[in-house]
Amino acid sequence: MPMAEWNREYPRRVTSDLVPDADDAAAAEVETGPVRRIGATYALGRFVVAPLARLVYRPHVEGRGNVPKSGPVIFASNHLSFIDSIAIPVAAPRPVHFLAKSSYFDGPGLGGWLSKQFFTAIGAVPVQRGAGQAALDALEQQRALLEQGSTVALYPEGTRSLDGRLYKGRTGVAFLALQTGAPVVPVGLIGTDDVMPVGAKMPSLTHRVTVKFGEPLDLGHHGPATSGRARRAATDEIMAAIHALSGQELANAYNEVPAQSPIERIKQVLPHERR
């Protein structure tokens, strides 16, 4: 569907269809402007930083051949550590984009500049925490990336697991997959929480990470994106595939108590730190 048709079908406002179950859309207020393409900083990250990280951390990678070589792809991963968003781009056989808090890009001074360059180098797209149009803005940005044949990485759990268990998935990833037709490649991350536990300032050099890419999932058989039942069933299929790769204990619950209002639902799935 061209972007103009997307905007007509899903006007830029939060609707009950997008957030009916407290878990519908990967939500954030995305910076306006054209979709990012690979530039010099990203190229540096892709061809210099990523190989260096592989050399230092020696990640064990399985299933790289499962990732389609071209066309739009959604990576759906478990979420254990801050470095998950580094481990996936380092291990993936093609460039990956993911959402990151805008504060990583607009900090002051040399530290802020270095942070911006680093996150740009690993394919991050800045988003601002907010409400209102936030959910649809994020979906539109991600859809635009997929429409140009790019890959995006998302965490269906919404935020990091503090106890190592795999939590119930929120349906934003399924919505995006059903609406765009992009295949979902499940990703199982193992050991990233040992390399950089929550609260750690620097990653450890004594642990190795395992990244497993599963076979692509075609979720179209579940039904249209407008169906809540289809989104839930597609999400459950995604989470079952992630579980098969990660081997985590299942929590059988959301990582946070489901919110009661649309605004709180949006805030829960924004990129955020656990305190």
Image: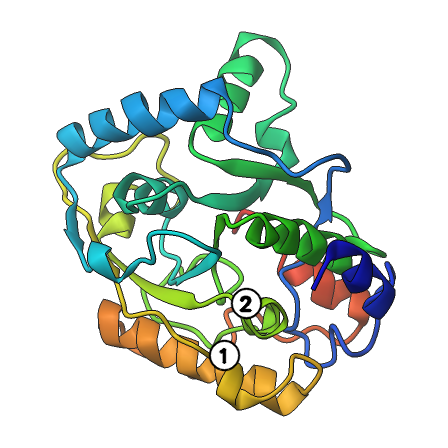
Where in the figure is residue 185, as x and y percent of width and height? 37, 65
Where in the figure is residue 91, as x and y percent of width and height? 26, 44
Number of numbered discs visible in the structure rendering: 2
Q: Which of the 4 quarters of the picture holds residue 175?
A: bottom right
Q: Nearer the viewer, residue 207 or 143?
A: 143
Q: Examine the rendering and report whether any part of residue 251 can be seen.
A: no
Mark 1 residue crowding within 10 angstroms, few (<14) / some (14–19) / many (20+): many
Q: Examine the rendering and report whether any part of residue 25 can be seen.
A: yes
120 up-or-down from 83: above or below: above
The amino acid type found where label 1 is placed reads Thr
Q: Describe residue 93's horizontal placement relative to residue 35 as left or right.
A: left
Mark 2 residue crowding within 10 angstroms, few (<14) / some (14–19) / many (20+): many
Q: Residue at (43%, 73%) from the top-left corner? A: 167
Q: CA distance from mark 1 to mark 2?
A: 7 Å
The residue that label 2 is drawn on is 173
Q: Residue at (30%, 41%) from the top-left corner? A: 196
Q: Quadrant of the N terminus?
A: bottom right
100 up-or-down from 224: above or below: above
Q: Pointer 1 and pointer 2: residues touching (CB < 8 Å)?
A: yes
For the residue labelled by badge 1, is the local secondary structure a helix, a strand or a loop?
Answer: helix
Q: Residue at (35%, 42%) from the top-left corner? A: 89
129 up-or-down from 68: above or below: above
Q: Which of the 4 quarters of the picture holds residue 47?
A: top left
The amino acid type found where label 2 is placed reads Val
Q: Earlier in the sequence, mark 1 or mark 2?
A: 2
The residue that label 1 is drawn on is 235
Q: Which of the 4 quarters of the picture holds residue 187?
A: bottom left
Where in the figure is residue 31, as x and y percent of width and height? 73, 37
Where in the figure is residue 48, as x and y percent of width and height? 29, 21
Q: Describe residue 20's horizontal placement relative to residue 86 as left or right.
A: right
